[in-house]
Amino acid sequence: MDKTNTKIGNKNKVGKIIRSKWQLLLMFALPFAWYIIFCYVPMYGIQLGFRDYNPRLGYLGSPFVGLRWFKQFFSSYYWKDIIWNTLSISLYSIIIGFPVPIILAVIINELPGNRFKKVLQNITYIPHFISVVVLCGMLYLFLSPQYGIVNTFLGLFGVKPIGFLESSRYFRGIYVFSEVWQESGWSSIIYIAALAGIDPTLYEAAKIDGAGRFKRIIHVSLPGITPTIVTLLILKMGQIMSIGFEKAYLLQNDLNLKSSEIISTLVYKQGILQGNIGYATAVGLMNSCLNLLLIIAANKFCEKFFETSLW
């Protein structure tokens, strides 16, 4: 009887919570359904990485080939270059791009006038809303050897025109710095919010102790947003092997292919253009597994040295 009464009481309690919080649950239902439909249901297709997929035979009817596609990728002549391109561009993006939003947020936070802060924020946010296609078109125009503004400026100093996008030498720098320009302002929002949550009395106490602005940033601002920085760094490390496909593909050509061919462009070419679904799925699965290992390692590292982690 006691167990029955307990179960009934728990059900009534759950029902009461649902009735009182139905608005929040309704808001949560849409993103929850989105994740289920577009992130978890497609995981059923992972098995294609172990099958010689034939649309006529379907998922389960296609022949099982085991690790054939994985062996094919690691026995290809280009697998080292593709993994290195993906890894090097990601690490370059983290080293150059990750600190910039933090610095920008601190600068905006330290500005004296609210009006100037809003103007600077709006200016830095705007590039985020530019389409990747438009951005790549801008890069082609600005970096053109014939009439690009960059080569025109360099020509004033006697420098011969440089084919920036026609050389694998410059691809990583173009990709990373254009990414920094486009996303730094938008990425700084979360740091600005974290800085706004720091207790103002800490700044006042630092002023009383004689700390200047730079010391207040070092000893108050940065420690105050360290948990946010560490959390975003862990998430960034989990995406280190997942570079945005659109920009890499749009900036790619036969002359810079040595540096621009990455895992996501290979998956697109093999899976969509050539119809090799099994091979593309295997490469994508390998990429996801590497990302999982990296985010676990980054979480352990941050938990040990920064005492902050995702779990």
Image: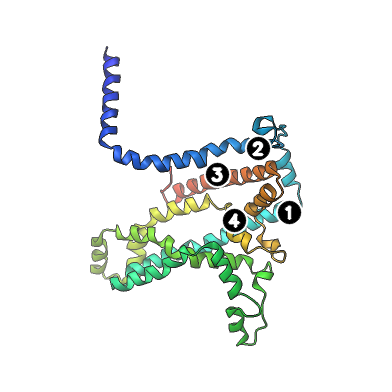
Name the residue located 26 percent from the left edge and 14 percent from the top edge. 2
**Disc nearer the start of the sequence (1/2):** 2
**Disc nearer the start of the sequence (4/3):** 4
- Residue 46 x, y percent position in the rendering: 61, 38
Residues packed near mark 1 inside 10 Å, few (<14), some (14 to 19) or many (20 plus): few
**Disc nearer the start of the sequence (2/3):** 2
Alpha carbon of mark 2 to alpha carbon of mark 3: how far? 20 Å
| Residue, disc 3 | 292
- Residue 76 x, y percent position in the rendering: 76, 49
- Residue 52 x, y percent position in the rendering: 72, 37
Residues packed near mark 3 inside 10 Å, few (<14), some (14 to 19) or many (20 plus): some
Helix or strand or loop: what does disc 4 sit on?
A: helix
Residue type at the position of mark 4: Phe
Q: Work out whether 5 lies above or below 23.
A: above
Residue type at the position of mark 1: Tyr
Q: Please, which residue is most extreme toward the top here? A: 1
Indicate which disc residue 78 carries. Answer: 1
Q: Is residue 214 left or right of residue 310?
A: left
Q: Is residue 215 visible?
A: no
Circles 1 and 4, Cβ within 8 Å, touching? The answer is no
* Quarter of the figure that contains the N terminus: top left
Which tag is nearer the camera, tag 1 or tag 2? 2
Specify the quadrant of the image occupied by residue 142: bottom right
Helix or strand or loop: what does disc 2 sit on?
A: helix
Residue type at the position of mark 3: Leu
